[in-house]
Each structure stands twice: as C-alpha cells, then as structure tokens.
Image (cartoon, rainbow, N blue to C red):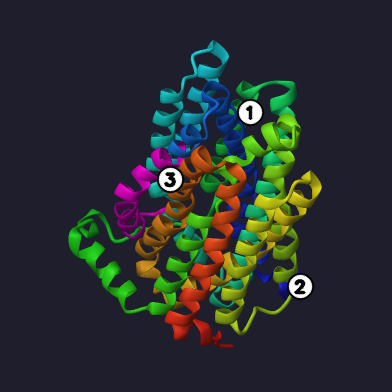
Amino acid sequence: MTSRFAALRSRDYRLLLGGQAISLTGSQMQQVAVIWQLYLLTRSPLALGILGFFRILPIAVLALGGGVFADAFDRRRVMLVTQSVLALVSVTLAWLSYSGRTTPNAIYGLAMLAGAATAFDNPSRQALVPRLVEAEQLPNALSLYVTVFQIGTVAGPALGGAVLAFSGPTVIYLLDAGSFLVVIGALLAMQHRQTGRGVSQINADALIEGLRFLRGMPLIWSTMLLDFIATFFAGSLLLLPIFADQLFHVGPRGLGLLYAAQPLGAVLMGTVLSIRRPIRRQGPALLWAVATYGVAVALFGLSPWFWASFVLLAISGAADTVSSIIRNIIRQTLTPDELRGRISSVVMIFFMGGPQLGEVEAGAVAKVFGARFSVASGGALCLLATAAVAGLIPALRRYQSRE
C-alpha cells in the first residue's frame, strides 16, 4: 500500500468506505426516482422546490441535537439506528410505488422522516472517520472519502436513469433499501468501539460548548458560510428534470446522464487530489474553486446543447470537490475529537441547508422566469457572493495549511 493511499491500511476505514460507496449509489438512484415521480405527479417546478424544504426542515430542527448525540454515544451504534430508519423509508417508497399509492404528500412526509434520520446519521458518520485512521492519514482519508462519495453519485444517477427507464421506480427503492443493509453489515463487522461520554452529556451546556468553539474559529465558519451561499444560489440539480424533458428532450436516460455529470467531474478531480500532496494554499484554492463552480453553473443555464451542458456540469462537480475536500480538511484538523459531532452537525445545517433551501428558491424563480434564467442567474450570484466573502474575510483569503 503506497503512502498515497495510507488511510486504506485501516480495516475499519475500508469497511466504512466500502459500505458508504454502495449505500450512496443506492441513495442517488433513489433521488432520481423520487424527483422523477414527483415531477410526473405535479409537472411543477415549485413542487420540486418544496421537496427541498421538507428535506431540510427536520435537519434544521434536529441537527444540533444529532451532533450532541454523536459526541455522547458510540457513533457506530448511532449509525446502526439511523441506517435502519433510512432503509425503512426506501421500503415504504417501494410499497407505495408498487401499489400505485404514491402521492406528493407521501413523498414529502417520507422526505421529512429521512431528513430526521440524516440529522443524527451525518454528524456521527463525519465524526467517526477520524477515529478510524491515524492523525497523519486524515487528509488522505478525507480525500478518498469524498472521491468514493462522488463515485457513488456518478454510478447512482446513471444506474437510476437506466433502471427507471426499464423497470420503474419500485426496483430502485428496493435496491436502495438493500444498500443500507450493506452499511449495517459493515458497521457490525467493525472492531472499533467507543463508549462515549454517556447520556449525562446530552444537555444545553454541551450544545453551547460546541457553538462557543465555532464562534472562535473564523476559518471554519467562513468556509461554512461560503458553502451555504454557493449552493443556495447555484444549486442546479433540482431543475434537471425540466432540462431533460422540456429543453433537451432526452427523457429519463438523459436525465440520468445529467445527474451523473457533476459527480463524474468530481471523481476525476478527487482521484487527482487523492494521489498528490495536499493543497498548501488552501484559502485561495477554496475561493477559486467556488468561483469556478458558479461560472460553470451559469454557463450551463445558458447552454442550448446537451453535451456542452454535460461538460459544464462536470466542471462544476470538479470545482465542488476541491471545495469539499479543503473544507473538510480545515474543519477536521482544527476541531478536537470530543467536539467533532457537534461541529459536524452545524456544518451539516449549512451544507444541506444551502442546496435544499436553494431548491425552493430555484423552483420559485423557475416558475416565474423559466428554468434557464433560474440556473444562470444563480450561478452569477454565486460568483458575486464568492467575491464578497473573499473581500470581507482576509484570513480565509490568506490561509495556508501547516505541514
């Protein structure tokens, strides 16, 4: 094993990484099916946007509590519960689809349940990774994790589009449920055990402790703010069914390709970052990456050609990977282990809140001005917001990682 893949020396990390790759592929397939079903049921961009609201609402309400749980209990056991709930959501979607009882309200309700589980799952998963590798392996572990995440989001939409075209959504939901069972098996096979600090640590003081730490770390909260602004304005995946159906006329197969474009670019970039030395001038690299993301999304909104749009989405995915890896490295290396769950929960609110609330904004703008204007204007606003953050937070603009 070369030092470039040093994190893979950890058996428990390999189990987590492999399980997540399969589960993320299934989840991305599920997202294609859910959005397509909701679009066919409503034919409304606003209805698609509202889905983002129902996804983020339980996360906004419960995420901070989920972070406290992640720091108080065995993070592996927390994930066993949350993954079981997410599998149950997929089984329910499969039953509704098979029986012909799927409705927009049912989709919204299950999205809220999945969001509640995610509010506890994500902080535990993010905080578990540093426990499974040596400290010097952490940058490599995070780069590989993001890369494998993107591989799942490449394979998932492409497979989802194909299965949707040939078999319908029911099969997709069943496959997704099976993928969660793989993660559960990986968690059970891990040797890592953590007693945690116990139920006595679930209190307001524990939450305030995490928020107080975050307030004193501008390098962490400024990257969170930048991510929120960028994804709020430039999130484009919500409107892809409209591009596939009304603008490019490529149907569910083309929709799967469009969904796979961003992750494909992300995988290529993630592979490059995984085998090279960590980026040293991380602050400037982060700002340039987010700016590139905004430009690519704006041009995608204006492009009249399917394959040009595919390439632009791939470029935005590559830029987003640079941003994601740098933000994760900064956060994980600057946060003490006993606070990682709580800080991860705050990060999750920004990380998921930006794109989910951005879906509501994008759907509303698309309803009034059209899908192209919604996406193009969002990319332009992302670029302007990045320039503003660069000017207002010089510490981020000058930040360099320590060897």
Rendered position, 321 above or below 391:
above
Q: Amino acid at mark 3?
A: Thr
Dot label at residue 118: 3
Q: Position of residue 103 (x, y in %)?
A: 46, 20
Residue 236 on image: x %, y %: 59, 49
Q: Which residue is mark 2?
A: 2
Up the image or down, 143 lies above or below 203; here it is: below
CA neighbours of label 1 inside 10 A, class few (<14), some (14 to 19), many (20+): many
Amino acid at pointer 1 = Ile
Residue found at x 55% / y 80%: 283
Image side of residue 295 versus residue 217, left or right? right
Out of 200 and 334, give the one closest to the viewer.
Answer: 334
- Left or right, 69 with respect to 283, comes to left
Quarter of the image containing the N terminus?
bottom right
Quadrant of res 240: top right
Residue at mark 1: 172
